Image: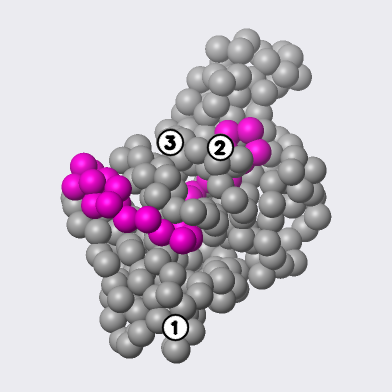
């Protein structure tokens, strides 16, 4: 089997089974595990999958740049943003993450809402400028341009001085075994800091993130309170999470 054919087969198995076990695949194809691992390394380098111990998982498409991410599940993100916005009550202090779904949360907040939104995303802050009843606390730091959010020690220090009622968290990967992941270590650290300072953490879980993984761990699924998921997803997508006891709220 040619390298091109092996890689195509690996991607087909990954699409079908949602994971690759290197040892099992090597037995199936009659090849050494070293050969399979080399193919996995190369496919990971192309962004086609995420390597994990013993094999690989689907790579999250949500690690693309901000412009490209706007085209992923746009209707689902609007539905999630609208549902999250309805959860915010007057008088609350809310952490709102960066990203395309968080922008939808900002856009759908009740025009009569009076609350404080704390965000490390300039893009989210700009969305709220014309909202008369919302006080905006913009967390500063070094700008991570890929996601348009502030990261680093200055951001973490500012976050530690706030106690929020809710944190709406964005991630790029949501996986039952690997937990919540994202594409940058500093961004992951800021998400953990935000979650520690919030009474409740709700993950904005658009469909393309479920069952995928990214390189840097944010935390386990049991570290957060629930996943906010769009309605109408296939049962085979959501049942594993429900059976594992993960709380899911549907739009």
| Residue 241 percent location from the top left of the image | 72, 45
- Mark 2, mark 3: which one is toward the viewer? 2
Residue 143 to residue 179: above or below:
below
Label 3 element class:
strand
Q: Is residue 221 magenta?
A: no
Q: Which mark is residue 220?
A: 2
Dot 1: within a 10 Å radius of its alpha carbon, few (fewer than 14), some, or many (20 or more) residues? some
Residue in view at x 46 percent, y 61 percent: 165
Dot 3: within a 10 Å radius of its alpha carbon, few (fewer than 14), some, or many (20 or more) residues? some
| Residue 106 percent location from the top left of the image | 42, 74
Which residue is label 3 attached to?
216
Q: Which mark is residue 155?
A: none
Q: Is residue 126 left or right of residue 62?
A: left
Residue in view at x 40 percent, y 66 percent: 93
Dot 2: within a 10 Å radius of its alpha carbon, few (fewer than 14), some, or many (20 or more) residues? some
Label 1 element class:
loop
- Count every numbered label the image shows and give the total: 3
Which residue is label 1 attached to?
113
Q: What stretch of residues is rendered in magenta? A: 151-179
For the N terminus, which image quadrant? Answer: top right
The image quadrant that residue 196 belongs to is top left
Specify which label sits upstream in the sequence, 2 or 1.
1
């Amino acid at each position: 089997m040619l390298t091109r054919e092996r890689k195509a087969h690996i991607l087909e198995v990954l699409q079908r089974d949602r994971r690759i076990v290197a040892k099992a695949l090597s037995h199936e194809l009659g090849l050494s595990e070293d050969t399979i691992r080399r193919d996995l390394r190369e496919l990971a380098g192309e962004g086609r999958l995420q390597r994990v111990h013993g094999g690989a998982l689907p790579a999250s498409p949500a690690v693309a740049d901000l412009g490209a991410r706007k085209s992923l599940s746009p209707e689902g993100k609007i539905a999630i943003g609208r549902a999250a916005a309805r959860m915010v009550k007057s008088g609350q202090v809310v952490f709102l993450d960066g990203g395309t779904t968080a922008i939808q949360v900002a856009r759908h907040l009740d025009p009569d809402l009076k609350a404080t939104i704390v965000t490390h995303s300039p893009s989210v802050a700009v969305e709220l400028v014309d909202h008369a009843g919302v006080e905006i606390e913009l967390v500063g730091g070094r700008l991570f341009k890929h996601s348009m959010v502030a990261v680093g020690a200055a951001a973490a220090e500012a976050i530690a001085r706030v106690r929020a009622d809710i944190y709406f968290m964005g991630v790029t990967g949501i996986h039952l075994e690997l937990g919540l992941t994202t594409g940058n270590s500093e961004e992951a650290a800021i998400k953990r800091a935000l979650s520690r300072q919030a009474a409740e953490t709700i993950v904005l879980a658009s469909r393309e993130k479920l069952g995928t993984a990214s390189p840097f761990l944010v935390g386990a699924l049991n570290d957060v309170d629930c996943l906010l998921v769009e309605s109408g997803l296939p049962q085979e997508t959501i049942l594993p999470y429900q059976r594992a006891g993960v709380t899911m709220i549907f739009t």
